Image: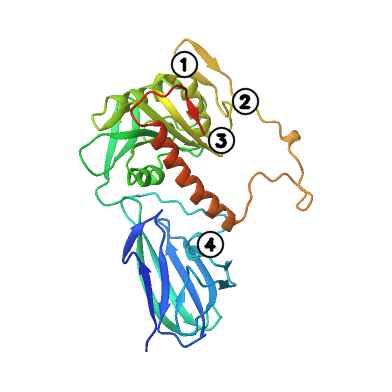
């Protein structure tokens, strides 16, 4: 019997949706290698592989079978996705066009050599960033440059403003995925996009106030509360919004962000200026092994688990505090 590789759900799924990967039709206890690959929109190739052994019935289910080595080991049902590494040094996997999927190729090879075994089975799976029915609406209103993602249906939905970090531009992957979970999310650019400033030399809070007002008057955004979600520089901007534009902001989530204004001064009309917090590199610790300061790090497996946990907690948090009722206090995560 020929081996077959199955992926559930079949054919396509959302990027944050777990997959069930299984192989059938193998010989009892047959050693095999599973490989995954995808290309990003810049042409970079991302790949992962792991070695497995079929059970006594010639079947292999990644939810129950431990990987015996490769890019990961142990029971890792999604390891073939989170363990992917680029063929370009230090290249990150980022979705730039959420209207198209990443196409993942999965292969089963005979034996435990990732590049030398006979191909036994193959499957292709699309990983999408917009759930069926999610609407993508470009926003060019006043000074605001953004994209609004709306869930399926004609009702009102809890509103969130999503800010990215100091690389600038407009990133939509997180907002598009959250819209699939019932939130109206505005992915907001604030520099290095279209006619916005090219550099983060200074920041004006009234720009974000304008975006907040836009969300509050949108007929499909459920007021009077708005949530904020920011990473890196976007995170400290969310804190500034929550502190100074606080009447309608009831939930703020930060990811890898400072709790002070950083990188550039923050202005608000003619009322005040918040200077940026400087950085003194002489205060950084020197790592005993590499002999220099280390600002980033971590292990892919632990990072994957942390991201999964955080993603669920973020949704739970926003559902709790964006329920259309004014809570007693301002809750921040």
In front: label 2 or label 4 = 4
When the figure is inspected, residue 273 is found, relative to residue 33, above or below; the finding is above
How far apart in space, not on screen, are marks 3 and 4 (Cα)? 25 Å
How far apart in space, not on screen, are marks 2 and 4 (Cα)? 36 Å
- Is 160 on the left-hand or right-hand side of 201? left
Task: Name the quadrant containing residue 187.
Answer: top left
Identity of the residue furthest to the left in this view: 154
Q: Which residue is mark 4?
A: 83
Going from the N terminus, do you reach mark 1 or mark 2 first? 1
Give the structural element (helix, strand or loop) at label 2: loop
Foreground residue among 171 and 120: 120
- Residue at 31 percent across and 66 percent down: it is 11
Task: Name the quadrant containing residue 251.
Answer: top left
> What is the x, y in percent for residue 212?
36, 25
Going from the N terminus, do you reach mark 3 or mark 4 first? 4
Q: Is disc 1 in contact with disc 4, using a CB cutoff of under 8 Å?
A: no
How far apart in space, not on screen, are marks 1 and 4 (Cα)? 44 Å
Residue 268, label in figure: 1
Residue 257, label in figure: 3
Give the structural element (helix, strand or loop) at label 3: loop
Q: Which residue is mark 2?
A: 277
Q: Residues within 10 Å of mark 4 (few under 14, many from 20)?
A: many
When the figure is inspected, residue 35 is found, relative to residue 143, above or below; the finding is below
Going from the N terminus, do you reach mark 1 or mark 4 first? 4
How far apart in space, not on screen, are marks 3 and 2 (Cα)? 13 Å
How far apart in space, not on screen, are marks 1 and 3 (Cα)? 21 Å
């Amino acid at each position: 019997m020929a081996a077959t590789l199955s992926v559930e759900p079949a054919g396509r799924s959302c990027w944050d949706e777990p997959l069930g990967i299984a192989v059938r039709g193998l010989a009892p206890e047959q050693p095999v290698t599973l490989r995954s690959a995808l290309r990003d929109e810049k042409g970079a190739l991302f790949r992962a592989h792991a070695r497995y052994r079929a059970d006594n019935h010639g079947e292999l289910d990644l939810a129950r079978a431990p990987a015996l080595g490769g890019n990961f080991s142990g029971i890792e049902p999604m390891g073939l996705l989170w363990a992917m590494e680029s063929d370009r040094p230090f290249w990150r996997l980022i979705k730039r066009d959420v209207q198209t999927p990443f196409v993942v190729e999965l292969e089963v090879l005979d034996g435990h050599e990732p590049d030398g075994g006979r191909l036994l089975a193959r499957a292709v799976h699309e990983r999408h960033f917009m759930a069926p029915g999610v609407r993508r609406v470009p926003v060019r209103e006043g000074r605001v440059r953004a994209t609004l993602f709306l869930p399926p249906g004609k009702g009102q939905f809890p509103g969130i403003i999503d800010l990215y970090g100091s690389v600038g531009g407009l990133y939509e992957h997180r907002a598009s995925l959250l819209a699939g979970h019932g939130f109206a999310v505005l992915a907001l650019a604030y520099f290095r996009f279209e006619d916005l400033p090219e550099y983060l030399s200074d920041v004006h809070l009234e720009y974000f106030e304008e975006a907040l007002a836009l969300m509050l008057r949108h007929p499909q955004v459920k007021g009077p509360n708005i949530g904020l979600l920011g990473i890196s520089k976007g995170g400290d901007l969310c804190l500034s919004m929550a502190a100074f534009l606080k009447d309608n902001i009831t939930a703020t989530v930060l990811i890898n962000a400072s709790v002070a204004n950083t990188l550039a001064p923050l202005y608000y009309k003619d009322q005040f200026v918040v200077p940026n917090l400087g950085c003194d590199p002489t205060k950084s610790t020197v790592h005993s092994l590499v002999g220099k300061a280390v600002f980033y790090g971590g292990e892919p497996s632990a990072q994957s688990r942390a991201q999964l946990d955080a993603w669920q907690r973020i949704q739970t948090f926003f559902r709790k505090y964006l329920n259309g009722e004014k809570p007693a206090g301002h809750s921040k995560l």
